[in-house]
Image (cartoon, coloured by chain):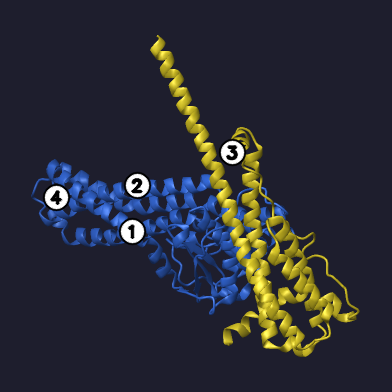
Amino acid sequence: MTMAEVPHERVLVYDRIGSNKRSTILLMLGFIVFTALFFTALATIIGYYADPSADIHSDTVIRIAIAAALIATGVGVIMYYASTAAVLLISGGHEVTKEEEPELYRIVENLSIGSGLPMPHVWVVEDPAPNAFATGRNPQLAHVAATRGLMDKLDKRELQAVMAHEMSHVGNYDTRMMTTVAVVVGLTALIADLLLRFTFYGSGSRSSNRDKGNGATQIILVIAIIFVIISPIIATIMQLALSRQREYLADASGVLLNRDPDALADALEKISADPTPLQHANKATAPLYIANPLTEHGSFLNNLFNTHPPIQERIKILRAMG
Amino acid sequence: MGIIIVIVVIVAVVLIGFIFVGMYNGLVRGRNRVREAYSGIDVQLKRRVDLVPNLVETVKGYAAHERGTFEAVTKARAMLQQASGPAEAAQANNMLTNTLRSLFAVAEAYPQLQAAQNFRELQSELSDIEEKIAFARQFYNTNVLDYNNRIGTIPTSVIAGMFGFAPEQFFEAQEADRAVPRVDFGAGGSAPAAPAPPADTTTTGGTPGTSS
């Protein structure tokens, strides 16, 4: 029992809330600017394919850019407000009541009392892989989710430690940031995928017209193709930069809330030892989970692009706390 | 020249005024946070106070002659009801915890009581309340510490002194809350198991709750 008489640090770290809010705004602005540029280039390509003989004037491009900026802003705003619902939908979970899942619900209730956060919505994902995530724009609209596997394989104190980790993501607005990132990354990957197909099919059928374009058109075409190729890479790098440190910090503030570092270490050990992959996670939503749900062991690329810090390192830090 | 000095003085006064107002508001916010956090404890204490008579009645139905234990529980409950202020409430609550522990130890000797659905539900609810009190206490004490630190340190201590901001009381937990099992009875074999039931019932007690 390492129940400290009086805590030595605040449970909510206000600096991090501010930093997360600022990063979210920057991310959204970046997304809007990038998308606008991207679609300007894209519209230009389409124009070129539709009528390769026409010259592309700079004021046409500017008009396209203004339209693209407006549309990108609209998409950005919708995305920001729909991100939580999108993440929950992808997770394949369902919301549960206190009567349906008394143990999980009580644990979350206790942690919400301990952290002074409003009671979040509690979700369960019917999947045997043990994992958990939190999402929501702010603590008032927060959702925390546990998989069936997590509830079955962990004992009560371990489950509480994992949920404390998730509650600290909620408390310091990691959820706002990470949910927005997930949707930005997901959407970018989807569009890039569609465009690559379009570009290849398009160029195949119209290769005979291609030679007629002038120099400026060729340059724009090249820019557009570069955009298509680099956008998923940029999105992935962004995701990496944002998610690794966050897990260590959520471990630490989760322990501050739950007062039992060994419980979280035990839970992470069980989670990492479990070979079951999570069915409903994808590359975009993976960073939201407490442990990487997409484990393919040993792959060099996988380690390079890992969204989560090594779980053994996290366990070591937690053991040192206890 | 004179005008510049006047302006500088005015700006300085206004700035200091703003800083003072900011510090004062910060203290008010801190005090409000502490009070709000206390209401989180209070809600759970009230739930506990409301539950105890039910529990006593249920146990009485099976073990009517254990009068001393019932009286101790009822007395502690009354003390908690009348307690004013966090320190007093914490003391009364700890006393109630001890007497309830004795009550559950007594209940160990009555298998029929142990098997009663009603008793198990009450036991599970009480242990839920105890956990919630522990978490509410943690949140409350964090806020008290933060507020008291601000009152005690310069420069906010000056404002605190001027406007009578007093330090708040902590809600103290019992020494060695769950570590030491209390063995008050000659019940022999059942005594070492005494601290276990509250922890057990949260896990096992949840299941019958779902089916009913």
- The part of the image, by quadrant, that contains residue A108 is bottom right
Task: Measure the C-alpha gap from mark 2 to mark 1.
Answer: 14 Å
Tags 2 and 3 both on a single chain:
no
Residue A313 visible at all: no
Q: Are marks 1 and 3 on the same chain?
A: no
How far apart marks 1 and 4 lie (CA) works out to: 39 Å
Q: Amino acid at mark 3?
A: Phe
Mark 1 is surrounded, within 10 Å at the Cα level, by few (under 14), some (14 to 19) or many (20 or more) other residues, namely: some
**Nearer the viewer's eye, disc 4 or disc 3?**
3
For label 3, count other residues whose C-alpha is less than 10 Å away and answer few (under 14), some (14-19) or many (20+).
Answer: few
Chain letter, disc 3 residue: B
**Rounded to the nearest whole Å, what is the CA distance between mark 4 and mark 2?**
35 Å
Which residue lies at the image location 60% right of the left edge and 65% below the top edge?
Answer: B43
Residue A282, x across and y down, in percent: 44, 65
Q: Are marks 4 and 2 in contact (CB under 8 Å)?
A: no
Label ID, residue A30: 2
Q: Are marks 1 and 3 in contact (CB under 8 Å)?
A: no
Question: From the viewer's perspective, is residue A15 above or below residue A176?
Answer: above
CA separation in Å, label 2 and label 3 = 48 Å
Question: Looking at numbered disc 4 in the image, what kind of residue is underneath it?
Answer: Asp
Q: Which residue is mark 1?
A: A79
Is disc 3 placed on a helix, strand or loop?
A: helix
Chain B appears in which tint? yellow
> Circle 1 marks a residue in which chain?
A
Q: Quadrant of the N terminus of chain B?
A: top left
Q: At 22% across and 62% down in the image, what residue appears?
A: A201
Would residue B113 appear left or right of A295 to someone viewing this image?
A: right
